[in-house]
Image: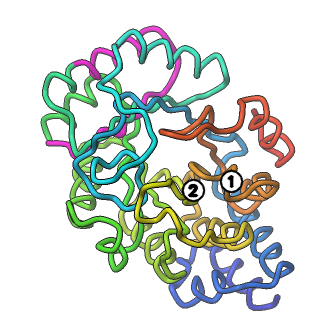
Amino acid sequence: MKALETIINGVLNGNLLSKAHAMELIGLTAEDDILALAHAANTVRKTFTSNTIDFCSLVNAKSGCCSEDCAFCAQSGHYQTEITSYDLLSVNTIVDRAREAERSGAKHFCIVTSGAALNDSEFDQVLKAYKLICAETNLRIDGSLGMLSENKIRRLKEAGIARYNHNLETSERFFPTICTTHSYADRLRTLRTLRQHDIEVCSGGIIGMGEAKEDRVDLALALRAEQVQCIPINILNPRKGTPLENVSRITPLEAIATIAVFRLINPHATIKIAGGREAGLGEYQQLSLEAGGNGFIVGGYLTTPGNIYQDDHAIARRAGYDI
């Protein structure tokens, strides 16, 4: 593919991938073309990032009963789903999960809570957990605690947080289709405030929610514009009881093409293959790391299990990563 070679050489020379070229690449459908795209994206990844894979583990520290109506989410209180809801876990339980994650090879540990934001008492409990994790492990600590005030961002930084996750989820155009209880602008505002306080920003989205390929490209471009350092790409695993339970799944090769285009648009970022990869990629999980991905969420997700750690380590080794 001569056109692909020209595009990749431009990226390797420091040029930004244009939307027009991104749309051309994400629209590829032939398997050989997608495999060529994946190989090219991996060349870009090797050029601009290290060969160390980013393994991140998380704890669902507060589950369910969320006031937001995100159409993909089994934890939303607007839908009747089959998840287990519970209040904030104890500090000791959260710290024990962090120790387990470190023993299993994770380098990042993220505390995730449902809901638009924690109340003050809950936030204080999470800060205690962070401080203990910093004192007792070598993990980099991350958070995904919803919307934050500037005061809470400062307190998180003082507690030692390294990275904060707040996904844009999809394009600005498609966002109102999946959420009406807060806006895309609300999410952008949080990202920008985090960056102002020099906290590493982790933000990505979910593919396979019924969005167009253009929406995926627009999300990747928005993340580039926001200078996001870590980009999780989730593949929708439809949950019974949510509005998206019957959405048609995208194919593994379509997901691979999307991952590759995200890499070409964001050549320096960590592209983390996250929730839904086991169901959405299957035997193509290794290829996702050979198509520009350089991170995995390991040890399971918020409401669904994942691979065992040893399997993910083996996948990363086969893809040529240092463990």
Magenta segment boundaries in residue numbering:
125-149
Where disc 1 sits, the SS reads helix
- Residue 52: x %, y % from top left: 69, 40
The quadrant in which the C terminus is found is top right
Q: Nearer the viewer, residue 321 or 248?
A: 248
Magenta stretch: includes residue 133:
yes
The quadrant in which the N terminus is found is bottom right
> Which of pointers 1 and 2 lies earlier in the amino acid sequence?
2
In the depicted structure, whether residue 295 falls above or below residue 233: above
Residue under numbered circle 1: 279
**Residue at x 76%, y 64% (from the top left corner):** 43
**Residue at x 45%, y 73% (from the top left corner):** 221
Disc marking residue 227: none
Residue under numbered circle 2: 237
Kindly identify the amino acid type of the residue bearing the numbered disc 1: Ala
Where disc 2 sits, the SS reads loop
- Residue 254: x %, y % from top left: 68, 73
- Residue 41: x %, y % from top left: 71, 67
Q: Could one spot residue 12 in this view of the protein? A: no
For residue 113, what is the image quadrant?
top left
The local crowd at label 2, few if under 14, some if 14 to 19, many if 20 or more residues have their Cα within 10 Å, is many
In the depicted structure, whether residue 228 falls above or below residue 106: below
In the depicted structure, whether residue 10 falls above or below residue 167: below
**Residue at x 53%, y 67% (from the top left corner):** 246
